[in-house]
Amino acid sequence: MTPIDWDDAADSFDEEPDHGLLDPAVRKAWTAKLAGWLPTEPSRVLDLGCGTGSLALLATELGHRVTAVDLSPRMVGLARAKLSGTDTEVLVGDAARPPVGERTFDVIMARHVLWLLPDPDRALTHWLSLLRPGGRLILIEGVWSGVGLPATRVTMSVAPLVERVQHEHLSADAALWGRAVDDERYALIAHAAQRRRHTEVVDVHLILRRGGEVLLARRSGTGYGDGLLNCPAGHVEDGEDVRAAMMREAAEEIGAQLDPEDVRTALVMHHRGPGGRPRTGWFFEVRYDAGRTAWEPYNREPEKCSGLSWHPLSALPDDMVAYCRAGLEAYRAGERFVIHWHDDADSIAHDPAGVSRATPLARTDTGATRGAGDREGP
């Protein structure tokens, strides 16, 4: 995609680069709109693609503290001159990835900016990550002479990521534009949830069985639990289901060529490591028979693993990652759903003398069951 010249783009609208706000009537109309969209209490506002700073100035006059960003040094210079004497910060930077570091904001607003970006959906996701819980994203967009983003398109992108979306038609309000317009102009106000939705990593663990034995890998060079044994394991990647992730990780780590029919769900464990965040682990059982299996496990990631070894499931070694050891013990006992919650002071390694952190969860009774670890057949 050809890079956009933001100076030229700003001048391409059928209104002045100042958004027409030099006209007192237009300025008054936009002040009234912003007063309705912005919080009533003083808030931290991020104005993206600020141009000459007109909306930033209106927000400042309404009592808010504004950080403004524009890619064009010329526009930033004009904005700084217009906003001199206020505490507004004006930065040169890409609106899609504003240079604000780890800061978050009560409000993010962008007028006639989103349609210019090469990846609007990615920009929206990033902008929403900069909002504080309960914050709001104000988007002023439209379709002019066949270019722009329709409201339905933007709503579809934003709605799944927020608590609610407010849509307001602006085309019919001639006072906002200084004249009558007949194209699509609108504002979307997206309200973030008061609490951020919980997200967590999903792990997949391979219980590769050879009769009564299980294959373990010794961690090395990973920065977590190095020197300890655990099952071949990894994380689910974006857009991947847990079974597909297990098949991919097995191929990457030990050269296993698995069919979906080979992979059996063994255990689901909700886990929190010492000082860490919760995560969900799926343990899958695969049966290996050296005489019949077409592949043989080998260490494909020597930078992460110092070696593979078989161990009796009934006599697991002590030098294991506690989480994995607890998962295998629960699997052998026939459990299917387990919580394993560390205290912050716990060791990552299994402690033979320590308190068990595993709590099996009751499940629907579907008849007689027995421990999976006691099954020797396929």
Image (cartoon, rainbow, N blue to C red):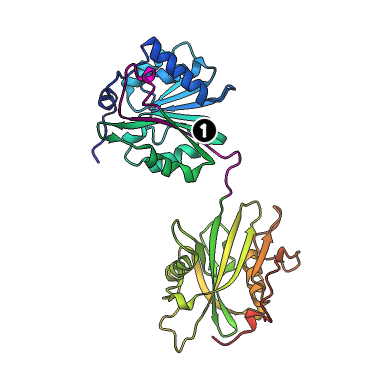
Count of marks overlaid on the render: 1
Q: Quadrant of residue 265?
A: bottom right
Q: Nearer the viewer, residue 211 or 82?
A: 82
Residue 74 or residue 255, whichever sits in front: 74
Give the labeled residue for mark 1: 136
The answer to whether residue 349 is above or below residue 79 is: below
Q: Position of residue 80 (x, y in %)?
A: 40, 16
Residue 179 coordinates in the image, percent (x, y) = 32, 17
Give the residue drawn at x 59%, y 86%. 376
Q: Residues within 10 Å of mark 1 (few under 14, many from 20)?
A: many
Q: Nearer the viewer, residue 115 or 293?
A: 115
Q: Residue at x 63, y 72 (%)?
A: 328
Does 102 appear in magenta?
Answer: no
Q: Secondary structure at mark 1?
A: strand
Task: Tell me the kind of residue under disc 1.
Answer: Arg
Image side of residue 320 versus residue 72, left or right: right
Which quadrant would the N terminus be assigned to in this image?
A: top left
Q: Position of residue 311 (x, y in %)?
A: 59, 79
- 25 left or right of 327 in image: left
Q: Quadrant of residue 4?
A: top left
Residue shown at the point (52%, 33%) measured from the top left: 136
Kindly tell me whether residue 192 is visible in this rendering. Answer: yes
Q: Is residue 197 magenta?
A: yes
Q: Which residues are magenta?
A: 170-198
Q: Is residue 133 above or below residue 67?
A: below
Q: Is residue 225 visible?
A: no
Q: Residue furthest toward the bottom?
A: 291
- Which quadrant is the C terminus positioned in? bottom right
The spot of residue 94 in percent (x, y) is 37, 32
Question: In the image, 376: left or right of 144?
Answer: right
